[in-house]
Image (cartoon, rainbow, N blue to C red):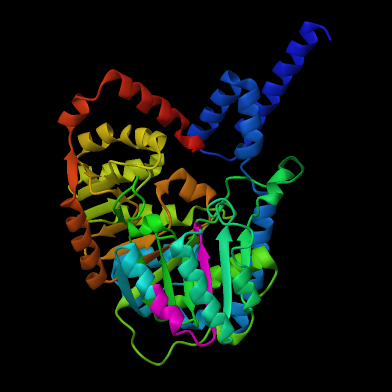
Amino acid sequence: MPDWIVLLLAVGHLAVVVWVLLTEKRQPTATLAWIQAVLFLPAVGILLYLVFGTTRAKRVAAEATHARRAVAGVVERHRLDEQCGVPDDAAETRRRTLLRLGDRLASLPATRSNHAEMLVDGRETYASLAAAIDGAEHHVHVEFYVIKPDRTGEALRELLVRKARTGVEVRVLYDAIGSISLPDDFWDPLEDAGGRAAIFSPIGRLVNRFRRDDRVDFRNHRKIVVVDGRIGFTGGINVGREYLGLDPEMGNWRDTHVRLTGPSVVGLQRTFAEDWFATTDELLDDATYFPEPHEQHYGDAVVQVIDSGPDRTWSAIEHLYLQSIALAEDVVWITSPYFIPSEAIERVLVGAALRGVDVRLLVPEKSDNRIVNWASSSWYRDLLEAGVRVYLYQSGFVHAKTMVVDRWVGTIGSANLDTRSFDLNFELNVFLQDARFADQLRAQFEEDLSQAREWTLADEARVGFGLRILRALARLASPLM
């Protein structure tokens, strides 16, 4: 074939890819990053785009949408939405604003009279989980991004096996990529005992990637446990020895989870039911999965369970972050292990700092992803110049995903402050409006600061040329991360 024809075909191929990129609904920075990858690394860039870059996950979206509609029918039949809702006259203006936004974006409205218990490390979380599961009478639903086949994972499996043998219904859902180290037979003892385990987006599907509409990097990053429909857990902690601080490379692991009782557990159960149905086609339709809350006052927390994913029109968790920060009057204190903010998040943080709000960001100095660390630090100078205070955690690795605003609202969940969490992963955060819980988040943040060092403009001035180049390159690639 003549060289000019090969060149013409190559140019034509590149032109088609660039045209598709330009016409897709995508953030401009992400579009530019993909165009650069395709233009400067033609073969590799196009291959990466075919595997990772297509914005619409048609199969994932279709399955998730079908699951939402099916579970919505369960909600309607059991009148679960009547357990939810906070009257407009029950809150001040900014509280009402956040509630209305959350109600439009979440699968269920906010609920009141909840109790929330903050769990601040792996040991505390695993102990609370084990106690709840041990007391289960009807069902245990478990969903994690990472489950490791180490002693921690084995301990969870054995506990679930014991409950399944007593007749308790046990279902486990785990992500194929996050839990890639699990051997194929890991859950055989559970299934032999009558329980069930299922894999979100199995690796086998990826073999036929080019004949499907899958996205390899659309992962289920949620962490949910529901016991008898009455006790729920969510947050940043997965299942593995590193979450106990037993990984010698990472050392101490600082993380945050939350235990919920009250009507908010319905929201966690609904999200699990949707994910389970999308994966297994089993609809959890019985009323025993969605029991009416006991006639009692569990606590003072108003809770919004915010589920988000690549199948949604709007990035629900990002919108709740943006609105909370925009309404801040006193403090905005954020902890995030992976900080690659969207333009909107950066602007609202800068705006809050410029108007005098005490904005602080706690990130790890020692990260498990060096490129992400370089990209994150590329935002420090602009934030510092606006008055945001940046702290680098020193005592191991901080993996908590939390924010507290004033003595008003706090959030704990699975979502990081990055594009992957807001746009690509299936995530879940709870936003709690409760002064007592906000005070606990603030106290824990201050304790974490005692294990951190502040990064200042003087530190920025000492950053060498080589690191600046690495930061700039990592930031260019950040929309693709």
Q: Can residue 46 be seen in this view?
A: yes
In the drawing, does residue 176 fall left or right of residue 421? Answer: right
Q: Which residue lies furthest to the right in this view?
A: 1
Location of residue 115 (image quadrant): bottom left
Image x and y of residue 62, in percent: 69, 57
Residue at image point 71% right, 46% down: 213
Which residue is located at x 48 percent, y 84 percent? 136
Q: Where is residue 313? Give x, y as percent.
A: 56, 53
Q: Residue 68: tell me if it is visible.
A: no
Residue 330 occupies which quadrant of the picture? Answer: bottom left
Q: Report the front residue among 120 and 188.
A: 188
Range of residues picked out in magenta: 129-148
Tell me if residue 248 is in the magenta stretch.
no
Q: Which of 38 and 383 is in front in this view?
A: 38
Residue 167: x percent and y percent?
59, 86
| Number of callouts | 0
Q: Among all residues in the image, which is located at the extreme bottom? A: 295
Q: Residue at x 45, y 35 (%)?
A: 478
Q: Nearer the viewer, residue 293 or 282?
A: 282
Q: Is residue 367 left or right of residue 316?
A: left
Q: Quadrant of the N terminus?
A: top right
Residue 349, horizontal then vertical, whole percent? 29, 45
The verdict on residue 131 being magenta is: yes
- Residue located 57% across and 77% down the image: 170
